[in-house]
Image (tube, rainbow, N blue to C red):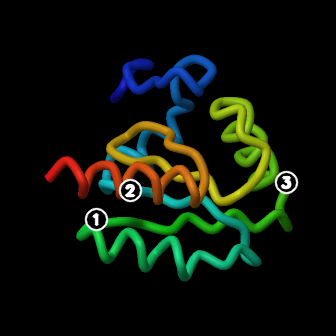
Amino acid sequence: MTDGILQTAKTDGPLPAWLAELVTGTRAVVFCSELTDTRQLEQQLRGAGVEYGIQRMGMGSEAMRRRFGELRAFTRWPTLPQVFLDGRFVGGEPEVAARLNTASADG
């Protein structure tokens, strides 16, 4: 579907297929653990009128731990939450807030 098209300076190579499928279907995708408090992040996205999805990554299964490892290797970001906006990795909550504030200031 993406053939490695979706990349940013913060990433390492093409998106894994499972990740490309998730981040291209919704404007913003938040990857978090079962314990991550995403309320403020979700409030910021809603306030900016951004459609978003939440992908909870429970570490109880080997498959999910492997996916988290792939996500972390791709983004080179060690912790959750990790947010993709418009198919590109943005960072965590502070980086999303800065991006949304910049976008709203631009009009």
Q: Nearer the viewer, residue 104 or 56?
A: 104
Q: Which mark is residue 28?
A: 2
**Mark-to-mark CA distance, 1 and 2:** 7 Å
User: Which class describes the residues within 10 Å of circle 1: few (<14), some (14-19), or many (20+)?
Assistant: some
| Circle 3: element type | helix
Q: Nearer the viewer, residue 58 or 62?
A: 58
| Circle 2: element type | strand
Q: Find out whether the residues at labels 1 and 2 contact each other: C-beta distance under 8 Å.
A: yes
| Circle 1: element type | loop
User: Which class describes the residues within 10 Å of circle 3: few (<14), some (14-19), or many (20+)?
Assistant: few
**Mark-to-mark CA distance, 2 and 3:** 26 Å
Q: Nearer the viewer, residue 48 or 101?
A: 101
Image quadrant occupied by the N terminus: top left
Which mark sits nearer the N-terminus, 2 or 3?
2
Look at 42% across and 44% down and name the residue there: 21
Look at 30% across and 54% down and name the residue there: 27
Q: Which mark is residue 50?
A: 1
Q: Position of residue 49 (x, y in %)?
A: 24, 70
Task: Say which of marks 2 and 3 sits in front.
Answer: 2
Going by the numbered disc 1, the residue's amino acid type is Val
Going by the numbered disc 2, the residue's amino acid type is Ala
The relative height of residue 54 versus residue 98 in the rendered view (above or below) is below
Tell me which corner region of the image, top left, top right, bottom left or bottom right, holds residue 5: top left
Which mark sits nearer the N-terminus, 1 or 2?
2
Along the horizontal axis of the image, is 49 left or right of 60? left
Look at 71% across and 57% down and name the residue there: 80
